[in-house]
Amino acid sequence: MTARPTGTRLIILTFATATGMLLAALDASIVGTAMPTVVANLGGLDIFAWVFAGYALVSTTAIPFFGRLSDVYGRKRLYLGGMGVFVLASGLCGLAQDMVQLVLFRALQGVGGAAIFALTFAIIGDLYPPEQRGRVSGVTASMWALASIVGPTLGAVLTETVGWRWIFLVNLPVSLVPILTLWLLLEDPPRPRREVRVDVAGAAAFSAAIVLVLLAAQWGGKSVPWLSLEMALLLGGAISLALLFVRIERRAPMPTVPLELFQVRMFLLGTLASFAFGWSAFTLSALVPLFVQGAMGAGVRGAGIAVLVFSLAWSAAVTVTGALMPRVGYRNASLLGFGSMLAGYLMLLRLGPTTALVETFPAMLLVGIGCGLCSNAHLLAVQNAVDQAHLGVATSMVMFCRNVGLAVGVSVLGAIQVARLAARYGGAAPDPGALILGTVEDPGLRAALAASVQDA
């Protein structure tokens, strides 16, 4: 094995890798602010949600494959290839002439995003020994929190000054930092020479199963009722394909996801915990702004401040706990993290329409701290439990399970919130949009909205 880089070269590589993660994370948070302007320019209101859904669908499905392929072919070429796709798709998004084009180009961008998400932490795992990964992974993971703080504001500034197309085009010059640095300085560890036989059948079965799961999450409770034949067919098809995938992997000489990894207790627990973390952490970002704007009447600025407290706490916790992880331990850090999140959610249940905005801050602080503890603990536990030969696929599975938890959690809880709002408002299906915009004042709807979010 080649010696790990040290000194200035190691610092530059770490900075470049973190910049790549920040770029991808910013892209996920910057688009939402500009979408009303995009719709006004391109039209396509009926399909604009797929600008987000298409990206999430493709990136989530592709993450495990980049991780697995990087274990065979090396991180460098796949990361640079993925970054190249990301940059190309960003340029095409900035040149899109209608909403259909934008949706397709965003899906292509999701392929590049998957490579960045999957390989960033795997590269960190190659660069640093296990006892140092916590500190550095904490800094890299904090890019997500930083992006959630900077992204919406940057999106608004770019849209109002140089135009919405620059929320995509700005990726082109920034991407030169990780591309040039990793191309010139990164050296992949040598890998054993062996015949490569790509697991096409397993990859196809896995992709199809995940697509059906994500489509069920995307459509469930909205265009397709949860208790319907269509939903039963979607979920039944996903289960059948998952069983087929397991059967294929047992026989494949080079499986997409080696099944022996699930015999490693820490890997199994880490991926399950990552799913739970994705569900419980990221749904907060969807529900709290609705509660603050609609139920409390604190406006967009109030919702932004509440989410800012959450993001700052997450960023601080993930940075600090990375260095403390060897002494605290993965189990204790995860228990403390989920416990802190639980305490924060219990505090949110005490809030109501007449609550002052400042009373949301302690709850958001606790949930943010819990997210910082969990996100680092699960990733490091899995990375340090598997062989170096499986580091890429193991790391990508943590990110994959987190993303699936996010997609399923937001969809399920969103459907619950909508259904409970109708029930609490007297069986109707009210639209809280006017309430959120402040053009209508309805105390009954405000109370029903608050209660429905708490139900979720």
Image (cartoon, rainbow, N blue to C red):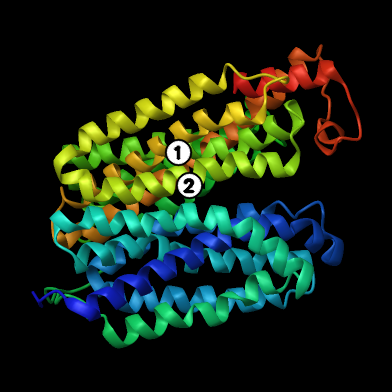
Check if mark 1's residue and mark 2's residue have beta carbons within 8 Å: yes
- Asked whether the viewer can see residue 228, the reply is no
Quarter holding residue 47: bottom right
The kind of residue on which mark 1 rests is Gly
In the displayed structure image, the side of residue 44 where residue 290 appears, left or right: left
Foreground pick, 390 / 246: 390
Say above or below: 431 vs 208: above
Indicate which disc residue 425 carries. none
- Asked whether the viewer can see residue 121, the reply is yes
Residue at (14, 74) in percent of width and height: 4
Quarter holding residue 116: bottom left
Mark 1 or mark 2: whose residue is earlier in sequence: 2
Say above or below: 412 vs 189: above
Outermost residue toward the bottom in this view: 184
Crowding at dot 2, Cα within 10 Å, few <14 / some 14-19 / many 20+, comes out as many
Foreground pick, 95 / 153: 153
Q: Secondary structure at mark 1?
A: helix
Q: Which residue is mark 2?
A: 312
In the displayed structure image, the side of residue 177 where residue 359 appears, left or right: right
Residue at (42, 24) in percent of width and height: 342
In the displayed structure image, the side of residue 101 where residue 111 appears, left or right: left
Q: Position of residue 301 (x, y in %)?
A: 71, 44
Indicate which disc residue 368 carries. 1
Q: Position of residue 358 (x, y in %)?
A: 61, 30
Query: Which quadrant is the C terminus positioned in?
Result: top right
Q: Position of residue 195 (x, y in %)?
A: 18, 74
The kind of residue on which mark 2 rests is Leu
Residue at (75, 76) in percent of width and height: 162
Query: Which quadrant is the N terminus positioned in?
Result: bottom left
| In front: label 1 or label 2 | 2
Say above or below: 13 vs 399: below
